[in-house]
Structure formats: structure tokens, C-alpha cells
Image: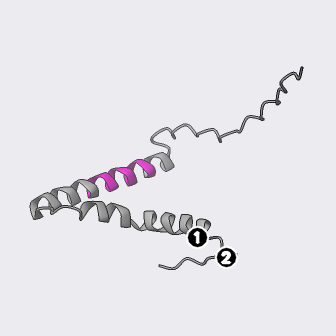
Amino acid sequence: MQVVVRDNNVEQALRVLKKKMQREGVFREMKQRRSYEKPSERKTREKSEAIRRARKLARKQAIREGLLPAPPKKKPFERKPPLPEIKAPTA
């Protein structure tokens, strides 16, 4: 995995790296490997993850076909204008 640092902007490169690692599932795997997982527990976890993925895929397909109503869209976040500064009276 590579991230290009542009204009000595290390903070932005770190954000990009973290996002890539999140997408790849590196953090999830690190968390799982902190402690030993029995093979039987691993099988049950992987099976439940597969079921969850299949249900999600079926739900998305049903929404596309019009069998289920689409979830309501989220409104984009709007920033409020800053409040005017009130100057303290000088005596």
C-alpha cells in the first residue's frame, strides 16, 4: 500500500492512508488478532458475516427492483453562518 505525500502535507497523507487501511479491513483484522480465536468460533463468525453480506445484497437488489421502498436520503450537513461578534463596551 502506498500513499503519496504532496507538498510536505503529512497530515493529509496520514488521513488517506487510514482511509485505505479502513477499506481494506486492516484495523478489523488487527482487532481480531489481539486474542486467540478458536477454530469453531472463527467458523461461526465467518458464517454469520457471510449471511449478513448475503442479506445486504438481497436487500439492495430488492430495492433496485422496486420490491422494497428505498431508505430516506440523508440531508447534507449545512454549516450555520457564524454569529456576529459583540464588542464589550469600553469605559
Q: Main secondary structure of the magenta part?
A: helix
Label 1 crowd bin: few (<14), some (14–19), many (20+), radius 10 Å = some
The crowd level at tag 2 (other Cα within 10 Å; few <14, some 14-19, many 20+) is: few
Position of residue 81 measured from the top left corner of the image (x, y, whole percent)? 78, 35
Pick whichever, 2 or 52, lies toward us: 2
x and y percentages locating residue 57 in the rendered image: 39, 54
Mark 1 falls on what kind of element? helix
Residue contact at pointers 1 and 2, CB within 8 angstroms? yes
Residue 1: x, y in percent?
47, 79
**In what element is the residue under mark 2?**
loop
Left or right, residue 6 beside residue 32 = right
Q: Check the picture and name the quadrant holding the C terminus.
A: top right
Disc 2 marks a residue whose amino acid type is: Arg
Which numbered marker is on residue 13? 1
Marks 1/2: CA–CA distance:
8 Å
On screen, residue 51 above or below 16: above
* Residue to which mark 2 is pinned: 6
**Outermost right residue:** 91
Residue 55 falls inside the magenta stretch: yes
Q: Is residue 76 magenta?
A: no
Q: Residue at x 13, y 57 (%)?
A: 41
Q: Is residue 73 above or below residue 41?
A: above
- Residue at horizontal 82%, vertical 30%? 85
Compared to residue 45, the image places residue 68 above or below, namely above
Q: Is residue 35 left or right of residue 4?
A: left
- Closest to the observer, 15 or 49: 15
As shown in the figure, which amino acid type bears the numbered disc 1?
A: Ala
Residue occupying image coordinates x 70% and y 39%: 78
Residues shaded magenta: 50-60
